[in-house]
Image: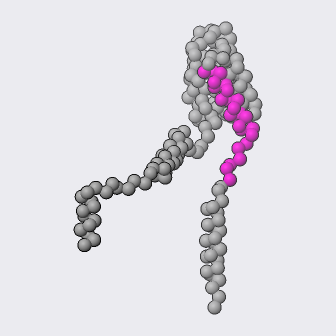
Amino acid sequence: MSYSFLRGAEERHESAHTAALIPAAAPVEDPARERARLAYSRGQTAFAAGRNDAALAFFIEAYGIIPNAIVLVAIGSTLENLGRKDEALEKYREYLQADPTGPQSASAQAGIDRIATTPGSGAATVGPKVDPPPTPYASPGLPSWAPWAIAGGGLAVVGVAAYFLTRPKKRPKVTAVMANRRRRRRR
């Protein structure tokens, strides 16, 4: 009698078992995307430090690598801080054309409104300091606290194991009362 249905089940079981033992390959990150993230991150750092010229250069570099519409809002904010209102207005409008209902559409519209209400909104006027640009390259995956929790749990396990493996074996001291009990049991 042939048990071919069992053979198929065993093969499925073995393949599932070996698949569980082999770790899944980490997703390969696009080098261009990483370069764009790095440039954008440097731009945010420069923007926060008030180095608007450097921030603008980094944002333009990031947009040149990967044209992400959110970077246009960052470029607009930086241009606005530099007093280049006409160019900032152009970038805000460019963002709204690219992504009218996007996550930064309110910021872009606020920038347009700010520039429009500023008296003499030419290149000579410098408006109020604009909020930092958004972060468009948020990486999905574990929350920021997860690696610390995993490391803390691992450290706790190692500490408990070290305690139990290195503590000396203590034998109870034989007191007179215990010796008498032992003698009585033997009788």
Place of residue 58 in the rendered image (x, y in percent of width and height, measured from the top left): 71, 25
Q: Quick one: which residue is furthest to the bottom in this view? A: 1
Asked if the stretch drawn in magenta spans residue 44, the answer is yes
Q: Is residue 91 above or below residue 36?
A: above
The residue range painted magenta reads: 25-48
What's the colour scheme? one colour
Quarter assignment of residue 144: top right
Q: Is residue 109 above or below residue 160?
A: above
Q: Residue shown at 61%/37% (left/top)?
A: 138
**Mark count:** 0
Q: Locate residue 8 relative to residue 164 in the image: left or right.
A: right
Q: Is residue 40 above or below residue 148?
A: above
Whether residue 81 is visible, yes or no, is yes
Indicate the quadrant containing the N terminus: top left, top right, bottom left or bottom right.
Answer: bottom right
Q: Residue shown at 75%/31% (left/top)?
A: 64
Q: Nearer the viewer, residue 152 or 102?
A: 152
